[in-house]
Image: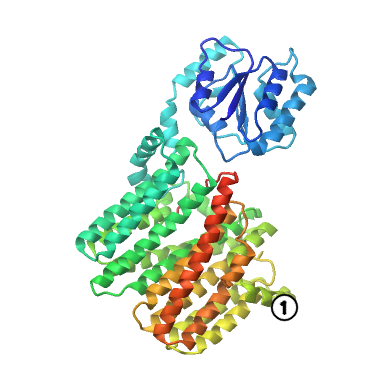
Amino acid sequence: MPTAILTGQPVPGSSIEGDLRSLGFEVRTAADAADAETLLAQVPGDQRVAIVDARFVGHLHALRLGLTDPRFPLAAVPGAVTARPAGRQALTRAMARENSSGGGTAVAVGSLADRVVTALDADGATVHRPELGSLVATVPGDPQARNEARQAVAAVDDEAVRLKSAVKARDGFFTTFFISPYSRYIARWCARRGLTPNQVTTASLLTALVAAGCAATGTRGGFVAAGILLIASFVLDCTDGQLARYSLQYSTLGAWLDATFDRAKEYAYYAGLALGAARGGDDVWALALGAMVLQTCRHVVDFSFNEANHDATANTSPTAALSDKLDSVGWTVWVRRMIVLPIGERWAMIAVLTALTTPRTTFYALLAGCAFAAAYTTAGRVLRSLTRKANRTDRAATALADLADSGPLAEGLAAALRKPARRLPGIAVPALALLGAAAVVATAASTGPGSLWPAVAAVGYALTSGLAVARPLKGALDWLVPPFFRAAEYGTVLALAAHAGVNGALPAAFGLVAAVAYHHYDTVYRIRGNAGAPPAWLTRTIGGHEGRTLLVTALAALLTAAQFKVALTVLAVAVALVVLVESIRFWVASHLGGAPAVHDEGEPA
């Protein structure tokens, strides 16, 4: 149980002790600063501890934001400071420094908690100070100030602020106006019944899987039920994040589950639509796989661009300035958010089209919408990259190299080609990646079953891939390298499976791409959680993007269509088992090991 140490002169009628207990703290009272230091030393090092001024006046949610958020080692609001185990040493040192400098004497004035925060700042510790907005948190110095503070507390509805802040600040139009107005109340209902965000996330996944099963029936009733359930799943998907913000239940495991399940739900639904269409005599597996490839590549563009510019210095661009200006005009904000087809708009479109039309029509609309959104966002980011003056860091280059997912073949070629790569102009790196990717996909799409030419093109692709990553990815457009690699690998699998001309080849390819895409998404989430890339042995075991591309093209050339289908299935199962076992092991171990909680608002997915 966390411990709160109350310091300073108690105030008759104050609710601070009850408020702290309602937040789950065990409350201890210190007679003076020296006593507070003694009580601090008695609290076990693996528990959260807070120092709170007994004269504190403010909203309960202000205390909650300041003292219970699991994401930050140190946090403070006026009159209160807290430390998780990771920040405990800094807090103890600051308390000792405050007392040794005379702050613990009888003549010391002001709030001990605030003086400790000042000492933490002086020590260079990072103290999180939450945005309180209209919430009150203060330590009044006299009775008049106390009365004014209490009036300010009474004038603001604590619960209304808490509910409003539970909604993500940057959501799409559909989510903002059609989901969040009521999903926030569902989140509150869940919080009051002790439900966790992870439980709601799991319920969202199960609802989406049932929706996919309904779509797989191939009946009009099944399609209507699938559309309704998909929207219900999205409501729960919004609720889990709102519940996390409402109750500050952030966790490393929760962030991974939320992000991973979003992709699993959407791609499982694509498979359900394809199965339902097949029951009606229409084969749309190529469209389903194409939608998954396009959507995944869109996400890789987002991830790569953001990582490339995560900590870029001198980050200026006329294009960015224009974008910021457009964001200041109400209607342009919503139009720009809608045309990129974020998850809310995308799922709403899929749900309505599923219920009213056919799977083929649904996929056509999805592909058209995602293609336009991808062109729009990628063009804007290319313009930003070309017009901004920025020096990208080693961290950004490492992140892009991790996202590239190069295997032993590309890494070996990169080591051999490092010297000539240094002499290449900046634009050559993404150009090489694009050239190799386009060549292998075009060859796979234009040649017939059993042709050796795709394998030859895959060898060339491995060579250009190695050359593209032979030097640090710090160029203006080097963030395009990972998306080009994803498009090459996924597009090649799609083209070869489509040419196989045997039932089951495209579903097997869908499974393989889904397994590999999971690995690539997992890499992103590890980088976002500051955990680094997956272990090198994992990338080597599954071959890297160039190794898998070469293997699939070789299998297509050497095997019959029926054998190729079996090989794709075996490869999909093998890759899925390896990446899932390692991913689950890593995230569960991180969660149990007390890794810092993560709550990545990110961009609307």
At 67% from the left and 57% from the top, the residue drawn is 395
Q: Secondary structure at mark 1?
A: helix
Tell me the quadrant of the picture where the N terminus can be found.
Answer: top right
Instruction: Point out the image quarter for the C terminus.
Output: bottom left
Q: Position of residue 354 (x, y in %)?
A: 27, 61
The image position of residue 507, as x and y in percent, is 38, 73
Q: Tell me which residue sits at (60%, 46%) in the image.
A: 593
Q: How is the image coloured?
A: rainbow
- The residue under label 1 is 416
Percent position of residue 236, x then y: 37, 47
Q: Position of residue 321 (x, y in %)?
A: 55, 52
Relative to 91, is 493 on the left or the right?
A: left
| Residue 440 in the figure: left or right of residue 88 | left
Q: Is residue 554 above or below residue 170?
A: below
Relative depth, front residue between 426 and 1: 1
Residue positioned most to the right: 101
Residue 189 left/right relative to 248: left
Q: Which one is nearer the viewer's eye here, 170 or 514?
A: 514
Q: Amino acid at mark 1?
A: Ala
